[in-house]
Amino acid sequence: MTTLRANEYRIARATLQRRPAIPHAKPLYAQRFIAILGLAGGLLLFGSLLPELVIAGLAGSLIWGLAGR
């Protein structure tokens, strides 16, 4: 083992031994708030686009059905 690798191994072990274990970390309220806003925004966007997507799908299937044999 080279000196550089030995030093790297020693530093990594010392860092891992000093790190305190967090048994039950609670999610932050800001992260929860951002997730809820993102979900609500996604539902609002998808809900407003859904009727147009259904109409476009029906029109496309009508054209495909009329163009086929």
Image: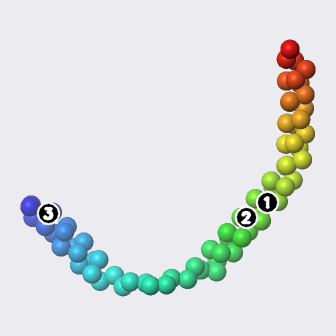
Instruction: Report x, y in % for residue 48.
Output: 87, 53
Q: Callout 2: 10 Å neighbours few (<14), some, many (20+)?
A: few
Q: Mark 3: which amino acid?
A: Leu
Q: Earlier in the sequence, mark 1 or mark 3?
A: 3
The answer to which image quadrant residue 9 occupies is: bottom left
Task: Give the spatial CA distance, label 2 vs label 3.
Answer: 48 Å
Q: Is residue 65 above or below residue 26?
A: above
Residue corresponding to mark 2: 39
What residue is at 86 percent from the left and 30 percent from the top? 60
Which corner quadrant holds the C terminus? top right
- Percent across and percent down for residue 24 are 49, 84
- The image's mark for residue 53 is none
Instruction: Give the numbered dot on residue 4.
Output: 3
Check disc 1: other Cα within 10 Å, few if <14, some if 14-19, many if 20+: few
Q: Amino acid at mark 2?
A: Leu
Whether 69 is drawn above or below 35: the answer is: above
Which residue bears the numbered disc 1? 43
